[in-house]
Amino acid sequence: MDFGQEYYRMFRGQAGEKIPFYMTYPMRNSFLDEAEYERDCRRLQELYPRDARRIQGLVERECDRMEHEGSMMFDEYPDRLLFRMLCRNIYRVLQDVEEEQAVMPDRDHPLMQLIEVMLTQEMYRRRCRYRRCRHRY
C-alpha cells in the first residue's frame, strides 16, 4: 500500500485540520453487515425449487428448536447419530405419515441426501452467525 499524501489526507478534516484519533478508524456496524448477509441468503433461497423450499422450511424449524446455548448444533463435533435422527424426523414430516407407518429409506436415497445437505448447510450458517455475534452482547 502506498503511504503517500493520499493516505495521510484521509486522516485530516475538510480544511486540513487534524481529527481526533478515535475517528481515524471508525467502527464498522457489524449488525448491519449481519442483517445484509441474512437478506442475501434469503434472496438466494427463494431461487430454490419448490420441493427444496419446502425442505428448507422444515430444516429451519428443526434448527430453530435446537438454537440455544449448549445445543448439539454448537458443539465442536456434533453427534452424527442425533444428526441422522433429525434428518429422519424431517423425512417423516415430509412424507406426512405416522411414525409407526414410516418406512425409512437408506442414506443413499436422494431425498435423504438432500435433507442431510440442507441441514448441514443451515447448521453451518447458524454456527458462523453464533460465533460472529456472541461476543457483542
Image: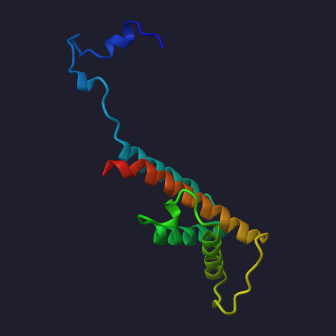
Viewer-nearest residue: 32 or 130: 130
Q: Nearer the viewer, residue 1 or 49?
A: 1
Q: Is residue 71 visible?
A: yes
Q: Residue furthest top?
A: 5
Point out residue 15 in the picture as x, y percentages from the top left corner.
21, 11
Q: Is residue 46 visible?
A: no
Question: What kind of colouring is applied to the model shown?
Answer: rainbow
- Residue at left offset 42%, top offset 10%: 3
Q: Relative to 56, is 34 on the left or the right? A: left
The spot of residue 135 in percent (x, y) is 35, 48
123, above or below 98, in the image: above
Count of numbered labels shown in the rendering: 0
Residue sitting at 52 percent across and 67 percent down? 60
- Seen at 67% across and 82% down, the residue is 95
Name which residue lies at 61% across and 61% down.
Answer: 120
Left or right of 7 in this view: 41: right
Residue 32, quarter of the rendered image: top left
Residue 26 lies left or right of residue 80; in this view the side is left
Q: Position of residue 52 (x, y in %)?
A: 65, 66
Residue 82: where, in percent of width, then height? 60, 72
Q: Is residue 94 above or below residue 52?
A: below
